[in-house]
Amino acid sequence: RGELLTLETMSTLEIANLLNMADQFAKGKQWKSERDVVVANLFFEPSTRTRYSFEVAQKLLGLHVLSFSEENSSVQKGESLLDTVKTFEAIGADLLVIRHPENEYYQQIKDKLSIPIINGGDGSGHHPTQSLLDLLTIQQEFNSFQGLNIVIVGDLRHSRVARSNADVLTRLGANVKIAGPYDWMTGFADKYEHVELDSFLPDADVVMLLRIQHERHDGSMSWSKESYHHEYGLTIGREMKMKQTGIILHPAPVNRGVELASELVECSKSRIFKQMKNGVAVRKAVMQRAITGGQLND
Ligand code: CP
């Protein structure tokens, strides 16, 4: 109880409860653990937002934080993921936050641990806390997900954010469409309608842009930055086609001038920095849930 590996196994009621708790934290709610809790942040892939918003949240919840660096750890001597996490459990960690390049890395370790794991992103699999902070940002804007037109644009096949979001937003009642190069839609094209961004933008409530994940391409990308931006990016001209109430999301880091025009990162429709701020509130709620064994009481 209290672990968070993917939102797929979480009911819409549980998700709503978690979002409401996160929204209370976003509005200034204070909560501190009554017992000493040690959290280890084990990041086997680079991260700025996820790692440090977890750390800010942990410090504000009064938790003891162990920051792990793979380069300076015994992973360099060949120690396995299982032996690394078992070590942190043995020395007193009560909770693990893990990011790892392998899809579903948690399957090989979760049943061998007595402490919960919070998934900070697995390969191109899932990124549940990113998804929750995206949901919180949308909920704060529109109050409900029912009937919202949401288009996810770009490098979907490599995106754990897209995978987590498309499924949960559909379950919550949104109309999810996909856009971008068709051969980047593997795993999505059979489930979601592929639309032309130019024709869908006037109807879109949320335009969710994704970073082109160069590190997960095999070097065969045929687009230059300029040609991708022209064909599929949110240009200044395309932003003007959006409705007044439409918002722009991007999990970041942003390739400015590629997925969207640099000038749009901080435009009035952009909620990109609000997403990051909401990341702290969401991670507080997720860790409160983990520490209290799945209960979300005030
Ligand atoms: N959005 C996100 O996961 O950013 P980081 O990779 O910087 O954590």
Image: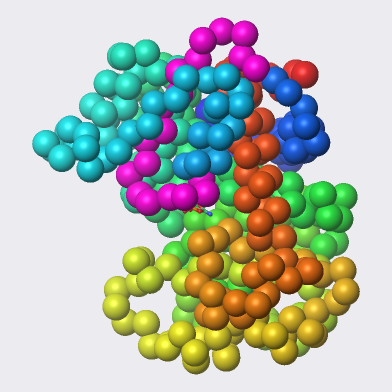
Residue 205 vs residue 129: left or right?
Answer: right
Q: Nearer the viewer, residue 292 or 271?
A: 271
Q: Is residue 180 above or below residue 70?
A: below
Question: What colouring does the structure picture have?
Answer: rainbow
- Residue 151 percent across, percent down from the top left: 69, 70
Q: Nearer the viewer, residue 169 or 219?
A: 219
Residue shown at 48% from the left, 76% from the top: 184
Q: Is residue 152 above or below residue 6?
A: below
- Residue 191 percent across, percent down from the top left: 61, 66
Residue shown at 31% from the left, 14% from the top: 91
Q: Is residue 17 visible?
A: no
Image-quadrant location for residue 296: top right
Q: Nearer the viewer, residue 19 or 30?
A: 30
Residue 264 vs residue 256: left or right?
Answer: right
Residue 44: within the magenta?
Answer: yes
Q: Is residue 214 visible?
A: yes
- Residue 225 percent across, percent down from the top left: 46, 85
Q: Residue furthest top?
A: 35
What is the span of residues highlighted in magenta in the rendered image? 32-50
Residue shown at 53% from the left, 67% from the top: 254
Q: Is residue 242 above or below residue 216?
A: below
- Residue 282 percent across, percent down from the top left: 65, 38
Q: Is residue 118 above or below residue 171?
A: above
Q: Residue furthest left?
A: 77
Residue 106: within the magenta?
Answer: no
Q: What is the number of callouts on the image?
A: 0
Image-quadrant location for residue 26: top right
Q: Which quarter of the rendering shows the N terminus?
A: top right
Image-quadrant location for residue 12: top right
Residue shown at 66% from the left, 56% from the top: 273
